[in-house]
Structure formats: C-alpha cells, structure tokens
Amino acid sequence: MLELIWLVPALPLAGFLTLVAFGRRLGEPLAGWLATAAAGGSFIATVLVFIGLLGEDGHSRQFQQVLFDWIPLGSLKVEAGFLVDPLSITMALFITGVGSLIHLYSIGYMHGDEKFSKFFIYLNLFLFSMLMLVFGNNLIITFLGWEGVGACSYLLISFWHTRESAAVAGKKAFVTNRVGDWGFMVGTFLLWTTIGTVTYAEIGPAAHALTSTTGTAVSLLFLVAAAGKSAQLPLYVWLPDAMEGPTPVSALIHAATMVTSGVYLLVRLNPVLTDDALTVVAIIGAATALFAALSAVAQHDIKKVLAYSTVSQLGYMFLAIGSGAYVAAIFHVITHAFFKALLFLGSGSVIHGMHDEQDMRKMGALRALMPITAGTFIVGWLAIAGVPPFSGFWSKDEILLAAWEKSPVLWVVGLVTALLTAYYMSRQVFLVFFGEARWSEEGDHPVHPHESPWTMWVPLAVLAVAAVAGGAMNLPLVADWLVLEHFLEPVFEHGHLHHFTSSTGTKVGLAVVSVVAGLIGISFAAGAWLLRKISTNKLEPEFLENAMYVDAAYAKVVGGPGQKGFDMFAAFDSNVVDGAVNGAGRVVQMVGRFIQPAQSGYMRQYAIGIALGGLALVIWLLTGVV
C-alpha cells in the first residue's frame, strides 16, 4: 500500500485541473462536491499508506518513491520523489482529514457566492501544494510546495479582492512570506555547499560534517523561513490581517496546514539544529506566545481573537522545538489542528448565523439559537484553555514540562501565556454565547440568528470529538500510552531529541499548576464578562487592541523612510541603470545614422563601390601601396 503514495497529492491535483476546465460549468454545489470528493479521496489514500507503513518494522518505516531525476546538474542531484515516514504520514493524516472537513463546510459557507467554483479551485490547489511540501523527499520539492501554499494563501486571503482591506491583506501575506523564502533558499544553498546533499535521508547521516558555526548559520536561516510561514516575531503581521479571507480559509491556513509548515520544516531538519540555534528558537517562541496572547485579550472581532490565538499557539510549538521536545511540538500541531479548526469553523457558523456580523460586542445569548455551534465551540474553548481531559491539556503540558527543563524562565512565560489563553478564550465564549443579547431582530439592520446547515455543523461535530479524544494518542506517565512518541522516535535518531528527566512528582506538580492557572483565567473572565462583577473598563486597553502598535510601526517605516528609500532606488534605476542602457542605444543609433548614406539601396552605387575596391586591391598587390 506504500506504493499508493502518489495518489495522495494526485487526487487534489486532479480535482484542481478538473475544476479549472469545468468548474464554472458544474457550478454550485457540484463544483464543491467534486473538490470535497478529491480531498476525501486523498484522506482515504493517506490512511491506506499509513496502514502500509505500520506493517513495516519500527526502525524501517521509511519509504521513498522516486518519480524521475529532476535536476541532474553536476554534483547536484535532485529527484522528484516522495518520502513516507512517521513524520510525513502524521502530518498528511490531519492535513487531508481536517482539509476534507473544511471542504465540506465550505459548500454551505460559500453558498450563493458568485465565485463559488473558483474558491474550490484554490482549495484543491492549496491541498496539493501542502502535500507536496510534506511528502517531498528533499528540500527542493519541499520548497516547491512551500511556494505553492504561499501563492494559494495570497489567492485565498484576497479572494474577496474587491474589498481593499482583503486585497491589502493578501499582498501583506505574500510579501512577508517572501522574507521567509529568502531564509529557506539561502539555508538550502549553504547546506548543499557544506554537505553536498539536499535529500532528507542523506542530511541526517551527513549532519556531523557541519561545524558548530555552519550548523548554527543553517539553523538560523531556516528559522527565518519558519518564522515567515509560522508567523513568529517579527514576521507575524500577515496572519491577523489574513482574517479578510472567507472563514474556511482561516481554518485551513491557520489551523491544519500552512502555518504549521514552518514547525514541520524545523522538525524535519532536526539533525542540523544546534544547541545555540535551539535556544534562539525557544526564546522567539516564548516571546511570540506571550505577545500574541496579550494582543488577543483586547480584540473585538471574533476571528481576530482566534488569529492572535493561533500566533500564540505557534509560539508554543516553537518553544517546544527550542526545548528539543520535537514530539511535543508535533503533538501540539495535531491537537491544535483539531481545536483551532473547530473554533474557526465555529466562528464562521456564528458569522453565518448573524448575517456577517463579526463584532463580539454585538452578539450574546446565542447558545439557545445556535445550540450545535455553541456546544462544539465550547468544546474547542475547553481544549485550548487546557482543561483536562481535553486534548489541548496534554499537548500544552508536555511543552511546559520541556520548557521547565530547558529554563524556568521559559516555563514562567509559557505558564502566563496559558493563563492569558484561558482568559481571552473564556471572554470570547461569554461574549458570544452567554449574557444578554446585544443584537436586535428589528430596526434598520435586523438580525435573526439561526443554526447553520448540516454541511457546516457536521464538520464541527467531528472536530469536537477529535478535540476531546485527540490527547489519547500521547498520554504521559504511562510508557505504553505514548503512542505518538514511539511512532515518531525513528525520525529523530540523528537529532538532539529531548528526553524528560523530571520525576513523576514534578510532572504532576507542574500539571496541577498549569490547570490552576487555566482555571484562574476562566474564573477572572467569568467574573468580568459573564457575572459583570469586575469592571471591564481597563481590560481592553487600546495599546493591546492595536497589538502594541507593531504593525503600525511597520507601516510607518515602510510608508515613510521605506518609501523614500524605494523612491531613491527607483530614481537610481531610472537615471543610472536605464540611463546607461538607453545611452548605449543612442550611441548605436548615432553610428547607424553616420554610416546610413553608404547603404543607399542603389545598385549602381554598390557596383561602383565594388569596382573601386577591386581596383584598390589590384594596386596593392602590384605595388604594396594603395
């Protein structure tokens, strides 16, 4: 069944090509069902490949399928091929699984949109690109998928491009990700010139040839790449603005796929990550997690809260990688895919039921009118808040344990972030589903909240089950329950995999502290936003609402000194570079005009010239003098 690996990316690619040719003719809803079938077929193929991989011995679970030699250039040999191992198949399972649910959800959410079929063209292309990124057996194939998801994110974020804010958000995502692409390319070049390969199966055994300095340089370059895609400081600014895209895009990009590609890249390249680079990764991750959590507490847009929450959770994943806890990072990637996709799709259901209203200050008391959406959203809230036994508790606490063993300072930052996460997510739930109804069914803009159609609530129900039970794949304390850790271990045999050294008592104590912190956050939010016993006047400072003005500072720099710098470069290009090229052209024109009379077009003139030339040649031969 491992031979079926080509089917996994081929099915969404076939869906994309079919919709390009016939999508408009198929129309709504057939175009959506075709795209969903392609995504679902890809998931089924992934499950079959997974079963085939399980049939292999634990340390032999690696299969490569080479399609052809892509770049045979001197000593550089790049194959177009797929790598199936525990890491890639784990990623592919939730990418295709959650991706299929998002496709199904989109059929209901995008109902009536005039570009219905085009939306599903982009979704299928995005899924194909993400699978190429994950299954590529070398850095070049991964970069092909990397660029593919970058292009698709631009198309999807700016899908409603007639809105200026959406068009600007798409461009911001595209430009910001290009910064990360620079790191990816230069890191790849440096890695190849140092060890002579870009193939993952060969990078691990050859990583020992890297000096400490070179290894750190390569690691930091790929950190730049990962920070661009996975929205870490200072390259996070594109992700909150990406909320301008349709809500299924937010779920697809910010939960299960694109934003986790940076995490995947660093985990995949774990053999080359040095201790110094890992410390930098941990610090950036912790800083990003805290910064985004603080920004989330004062947001009013239901999707903006989740966007900053995503940035914060990605910071947690980087903290895990920096602590050497690669399994914990992937564990949180998976659980985050479940509960964050659930939360984003739930927010989309609320927006759909509220007739496109996104301001939480204009919601409230929706649990009775939207019971399925409310129930599933609450499950996602408890999971991300770290309430046991929901999945987020297990993965988050494993990261906090690794941070404790790395540095107590990092653990404190992670713990404060956990408290803030429980607070701002509770605030969101109380404002949206509880309290008083702050909307009206009468007046100039009446609102009639209602539950979403089955194509939207079925994915919510499935993801809610996953958000509850997902933690079972890697339960601590009992070795036999660490299923994910044992499955992934062969991938890290050449890397610096962290092994927990804390006693059972320490682990339990840290978990209890984490749960207490989460409960404090929930209790404070309940007192402020549900019971209204705590004044909320100072809980939403403008400083945090504007995300500490980092994005505004970027805009001022780019629009001020940056714009002047761009103008100077443009003037230099126009006057110096183009001037030199145009000057050379004018010289050629002048020479042409000077010799043009010799080319009159009269045959008699040419005949006289030939005769005179012949006579001069004869005289020279006879006398040696013309």
Image (cartoon, rainbow, N blue to C red):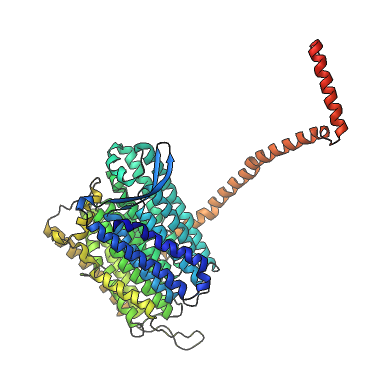
Q: Position of residue 25 (x, y in %)?
A: 53, 72
Foreground of the two, 511 or 40: 40
Q: Quadrant of residue 123?
A: bottom left
Q: Which residue is found at the position 42% from the left and 77% from the top?
A: 108
Query: In the image, 600: left or right of 438?
Result: right
Does 555 sit above or below residue 298?
above
Foreground of the two, 521 or 400: 400
Q: Which residue is found at the position 37% from the left and 61% from the top?
A: 257
Q: Position of residue 595 (x, y in %)?
A: 79, 32
User: In which quadrant of the rendered image does the N terminus lie?
Assistant: bottom left
Foreground of the two, 544 or 404: 404
Does 340 sit above or below residue 503?
below
Residue extending farthest to the top is 623
Foreground of the two, 115 or 263: 115
Q: Quadrant of residue 612?
A: top right
Looking at the image, can residue 325 be seen?
Answer: yes
Q: Position of residue 445 (x, y in %)?
A: 50, 84
Q: Which residue is found at the position 52% from the left and 66% from the top?
A: 21
